[in-house]
Image (spheres, helix red, strand yellow):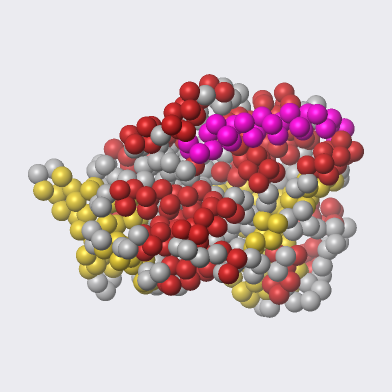
């Protein structure tokens, strides 16, 4: 079949490669000049920055993509396992390293926060159980196809749904496991991995620490942007065509007696006829801008679902290097509940933000000149609701510089040789993410996993959705899986 894919984000690339393997004729239309979507790259003044994701988990989903094409991922891309997953600095200066090695992490938690090794052991067992019960069900399958519910493994999971800790919040669960509030703050942070609040998100989402600590966290040699580049190379080898700098203006469909069927898509310069169209862009933008269908029930439903949080990014080319910094560093705020109230209720950047600093050159030295560092600084930010972003940015820049200067014992502003960055509306402008949300809808309700947009449209025959705003949600591994689920459904639709 002839397939048109709108968007070369990770999900679009994953679907493209898989469908080419299955013998389909695939063309990807991308408005930007390069693949990757949110996983983009910027080079300036001798520095290179990843401008989106910085931490990779579940590398096996990428391996599986290459394997399904009969290739070895190692021949395209090198993953670098991180021994020290993240270095944490609390507001009183307490420092702690989260190691991948369980023993090392356990003794660090005991030494720094007085947490018993048994508490961590119990917690990891509990996270692993959640992952065992729900991981496959939610991440590897469509939740909207009857066939999913006939698989024995899925039926087993469904019978254990009551063990998924749906009725406590992530924060409540952590407070029950750990005695030190700082340990709770550390593990509560995982709610931000899908743009949610630990005080609202069901404890089921403690699957995320299981994935990171038990499966490991990775950097990518050459930076995260090397991942979409490698996926694009694989897709091209399999025969996929790419059209960059080519925004899709419209999805073409016919409506015969109430049955809508997709016929192709339209760009500024061509009308492309296709049997199947896959949208890798945001669900809201697909209905509103490409289908002109704001009456679609799913569009209306999405309008009423809470978007995930966004991010404010500062890219600093630093004229010095800092041994105090690891690859991933978190400088926590003093009052975590207040930070999330700001983000989700007041829709303002927090007065005292948690600051994340990723130093890419720690794993890819060529990303900064010798003796210097490329800092990607990310703050959780509310979704775009028309705030005065320039004012918010000035406030946040001052907070970042003050926090990092005191934590690192240096006048950070004086050392900045290159600076750029972006705000939530830029994320929407550059990638189409509604409200600048990083991960589609938030998981702040118990049913969020079931409310994400299905990968197959019931309203338009031949139309499919993949990507962070569709099932199973955002984050790099889930986006790659979203492409896999979608490709499976297209193949089933043959
Ligand atoms: C700042 C930031 C930090 C993040 N950190 C992490 C992290 O550490 N770990 C992690 O796992 N995830 C992280 N994420 C989330 C992760 O990047 C995303 O979930 C994932 O990359 C989304 O992939 P996607 O397939 O949904 O497509 P997207 O990346 O959203 O790509 C969609 C593509 O569609 C294109 N497009 C849009 N409209 C059109 C049109 N009309 N015509 C043609 N093309 C169009 C866009 O240009 C874009 O290339 C982060 C995201 C951001 C922004």
User: Taking the image as drawn, is residue 345 in sight?
Assistant: no
Residue found 51% across the figure and 55% down from its top = 64
Q: Is residue 268 above or below residue 405?
A: below
Residue 257 location (% of width, % of height): 9, 44
Give residue 40's quadrant in the image. bottom right
Residue found 37% across the figure and 69% down from its top = 240
Residue 280 location (% of width, % of height): 40, 55
Q: Would you say 321 lies left or right of 139 here?
A: right
Image quarter in which the N terminus is found: bottom left
Residue that sits furthest to the right in the current view: 111
Q: Would you say 100 lies left or right of 474 here?
A: right
Residue 400 location (% of width, % of height): 73, 54
Residue found 58% across the figure and 34% down from its top = 132
Give residue 253's quadrant in the image. bottom left
Between residue 150 and residue 282, name the one nearer to us.
Answer: 150
Q: Would you say 191 lies left or right of 280 here?
A: right
User: Taking the image as drawn, is residue 271 in sight?
Assistant: yes
Q: Is residue 415 above or below residue 426?
A: below
Residue found 55% across the figure and 64% down from its top = 72
Q: Would you say 207 lies left or right of 239 here?
A: right
Between residue 389 and residue 479, name the one nearer to us.
Answer: 479
Q: Is residue 464 above or below residue 208?
A: below
Q: Is residue 129 magenta?
A: yes
What's drawn in magenta, residue-wise? Answer: 113-138
């Amino acid at each position: 079949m002839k397939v048109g894919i709108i968007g070369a984000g990770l999900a679009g690339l994953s679907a493209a490669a898989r469908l080419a393997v299955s013998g389909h004729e695939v063309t990807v239309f991308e408005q930007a000049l390069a693949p990757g979507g949110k996983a983009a790259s910027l080079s300036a003044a001798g520095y290179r920055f990843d401008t989106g994701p910085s931490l990779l988990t579940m590398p096996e989903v990428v391996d599986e993509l290459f394997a399904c094409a009969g290739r070895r991922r190692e021949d395209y891309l090198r993953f670098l396992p991180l021994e020290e997953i993240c270095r944490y600095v609390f507001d009183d200066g307490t420092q702690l390293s989260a190691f991948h090695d369980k023993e090392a992490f356990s003794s660090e938690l005991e030494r720094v926060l007085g947490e018993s090794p048994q508490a961590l052991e119990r917690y990891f067992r509990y996270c692993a159980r959640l992952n065992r019960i729900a991981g496959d069900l939610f991440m590897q399958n469509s939740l909207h196809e009857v066939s999913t519910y006939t698989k024995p493994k899925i039926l087993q999971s469904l019978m254990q749904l009551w063990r998924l800790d749906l009725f406590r919040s992530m924060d409540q669960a952590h407070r029950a496991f750990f005695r030190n509030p700082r340990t709770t703050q550390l593990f509560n942070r995982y709610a931000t991995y899908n743009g949610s609040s630990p005080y609202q998100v069901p404890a089921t989402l403690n699957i995320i620490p299981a994935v990171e600590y038990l499966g490991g966290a990775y950097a990518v040699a050459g930076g995260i942007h090397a991942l979409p580049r490698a996926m694009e190379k694989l897709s091209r080898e399999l025969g996929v065509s790419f059209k960059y700098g080519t925004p899709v203006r419209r999805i073409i469909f016919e409506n015969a007696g109430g049955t809508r069927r997709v016929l192709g898509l339209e760009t500024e310069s061509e009308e492309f006829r296709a049997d199947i169209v896959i949208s890798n862009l945001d669900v809201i933008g697909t209905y509103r801008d490409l289908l002109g269908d704001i009456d679609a029930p799913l569009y209306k439903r999405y309008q009423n679902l809470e978007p995930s949080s966004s991010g404010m990014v500062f890219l600093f080319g630093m004229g010095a290097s800092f041994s105090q910094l690891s690859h991933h560093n978190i400088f926590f705020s003093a009052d975590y509940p207040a930070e999330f109230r700001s983000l989700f209720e007041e829709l303002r950047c927090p007065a005292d933000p948690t600051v994340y600093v990723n130093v890419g050159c720690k794993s890819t030295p060529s990303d900064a000149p010798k003796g210097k560092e490329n800092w990607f600084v990310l703050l959780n930010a509310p979704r775009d609701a028309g705030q005065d972003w320039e004012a918010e940015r000035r406030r946040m820049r001052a907070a970042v510089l003050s926090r990092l200067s005191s934590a690192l014992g240096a006048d950070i502003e004086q050392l900045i040789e290159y600076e750029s960055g972006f705000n939530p509306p830029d994320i929407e402008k550059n990638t189409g993410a509604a409200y600048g949300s990083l991960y589609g809808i938030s998981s702040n309700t118990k049913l969020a996993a079931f409310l994400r947009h299905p990968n197959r449209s019931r309203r338009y025959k031949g139309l499919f959705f993949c990507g962070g705003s569709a099932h199973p949600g955002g984050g790099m591994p889930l986006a790659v899986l979203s492409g896999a689920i979608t490709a499976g459904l297209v193949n089933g639709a043959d």
